Amino acid sequence: MPNPEVDILLKAKDMASATFQKVGKSSSGAGQAIQKHWKAASVALGVAAIGIEKIGGEAKKTTESIDKLSITTGVSSDELRHLVTETANYTFPVKEVLGLFKLAQK
């Protein structure tokens, strides 16, 4: 006499095995793609890291400039930062806005 519980377990095992085999093939393909493009990916990540470091350095310089200008003008750093970002645009960069504010402060 067939046992329905055993039949269910065997079907589930067969279905799971097929799924695991598909996952294994997919992850193998992904691994091969990573190996194939590893050098290009490493270079791209390196360039991105340099860019992020440069942006961080520029942001630090901008913050320092705003803080110094805040001290000499008596306007809070937050207010100056807001004024600088509102004034700057693609034709009038932040660096030039800060230079103009420094000149006006003198």
Image: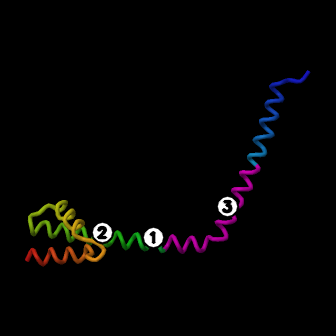
Does residue 37 show up magenta in the picture? yes
Label total for image:
3
Q: Which residue is mark 1?
A: 49
Q: Is residue 19 left or right of residue 78?
A: right
Percent position of residue 88, x then y: 25, 71
Residue in view at x 28 percent, y 77 percent: 91
Note whether 1 is above or below 17 in the view shown.
Answer: above
Q: Which mark is residue 30?
A: 3
Camera-nearest residue between 97 and 19: 97
Region in magenta: 21-46
Q: Is residue 99 left or right of residue 46?
A: left
- Mark 3: few/some/many CA within 10 Å (<14, 14-19, 20+): few
Look at the numbered disc 2 and give the secondary structure of its residue. helix
Residue type marked 1: Ala
**How far, Cα to Cα, is label 3 from label 2?**
37 Å
Q: Earlier in the sequence, mark 3 or mark 1?
A: 3
Percent position of residue 42, x then y: 55, 71
Look at the numbered disc 3 and give the secondary structure of its residue. helix
